[in-house]
Image (spheres, rainbow, N blue to C red):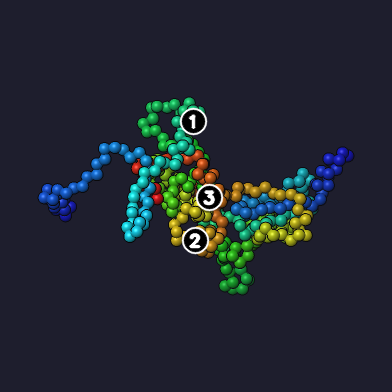
Amino acid sequence: MSAAKRVQQWATFARTWHVFDCKWQDPYESANIIKKYLMGMHKPIYHPMNDCGDVVVCINSREIALRGDDWRKRAYFHHTGYPGGASWTLAWELHNKDPTMIIKKAVYRSMKGNLQRRHTMERLFIYPEEKVPEDIMQNVTNQIRQIRQVPTRLDHIPEEVVKNYPKVMEYPEDYILK
Amino acid sequence: MAALVRAGFSLAKNAIFSTSIRSISTTKHLNIKEIRTSLEGSNIIIEGVTVPSPRTELLIRPEKLNTLIENKSTESIEKPPCYMCSLGLDVKHTDVLILSQFVRSDGCMLPRRITGLCRRQQKKIGKMVTMAQKAGLMINLTPAYSKKDPKKRWNYKKFNTYFDETTIFMKRIPKPLDRFKR
């Protein structure tokens, strides 16, 4: 076995640790990607009955972005089990209480409900900030590519670039600047 | 009837007091104007200064790009397409460098008589400006009273939001529950 093949063998059977930056990412889109790494579906040896899933560390989960008016329209349902124990929490209220919950529920719901799902979720770490404990960060060897590009704010672009950027609209000849 | 009386009254008034002020200018205004106010002693001086447009040098027009002319050499069209249509740019709501050209210093979208766009493009750009403002991407182009930092906004507005440009011309934006309906 050549050296390259040997390393490929190790990499296939070892638990790789991936990091995923949730900044400006849709949790429901990124859950489908995180799920594949958690279950090991990106490996050629994948089978539902072999334990080949990886570990994913999600950072910046406070900075996730929902589409359109989802923050105030999407509701999360909970029932205590008692009569009248139903409650609906809006996405922004849930995110205020626990900034890791939305991404956790999105990943949980993207997977099929079987006995393996709870164990697969144990391999997902979510952190609201960029700060990750050192003993977790030292295992990370790979980064998952983000789906959406993080937008740049206009006030973060230098003034020179804004001024010298090619212009599309020209003011009319008698326009009064405001 | 009332309108007729009013019209007759104004006609008679004009005939008696012919003090109609007409602003005739024989030459065309060549430059854009800037209104400056300055305080000199106890006098406030308000002057309109003509300034050369800062954009003429950097302006991009399809006439300048030779490749586009060869593709679109149709002269029989009754109405030429507006500059945004003929440029054919795929503008997203995150392209703040382009969208900021269409707004005033308080972040308000300029009207169509100033932008010179067609109806469809004006609607599209206007909506994308709104999207960029809601996403907090142009916070230096906002009214003075607004909370500049998006994270200091109220309730659901303080969290990051992104938008889908394909919903701009939809009559009704489909809800996620629609796929279960029959």
User: In which image quadrant can residue A86 be found?
Assistant: bottom right
Tell me where residue B82 sits by quadrant.
top left
Q: Using the image, tell me which numbered label, if any, was put on residue A154.
A: 3
Tell which subunit mark 3 falls on.
Answer: A
Mark 1 highlights which residue?
Answer: B65
Question: Badge 1: few (under 14), some or many (20 or more) residues near its Cα, within 10 Å?
Answer: few
* Residue located beneath label 2 in the image: B147
Mark 3: amino acid: Leu
Q: Which amino acid type corresponds to the residue marked 1 in the rendered image?
A: Leu
Three-letter amino acid code of the residue under disc 2: Lys
Any mark on residue A79, and which?
none
Would you call the spot at circle 3 few (<14 residues within 10 Å), some (14-19), or many (20 or more)? many
Chain containing mark 1: B
- Distance from disc 1 to disc 3, alpha carbons, whole Å, reads 27 Å
Looking at the picture, how far across and down is residue B127, in whole percent? Answer: 45, 49
SS type, badge 3: helix
Query: Which badge, 2 or 1, is on the more N-terminal residue?
Result: 1
Is residue B179 in view? no
Q: CA distance from mark 2 to mark 1?
A: 41 Å
In terms of secondary structure, where does tag 1 sit? loop
Labels 2 and 1 in the same subunit: yes
Asked if badges 3 and 2 are on one and the same chain, I answer: no
Bin the neighbour count of mark 2 within 10 Å (Cα to Cα): few under 14, some 14-19, many 20 and up: few
**Do the residues marked 1 and 3 share a common chain?**
no
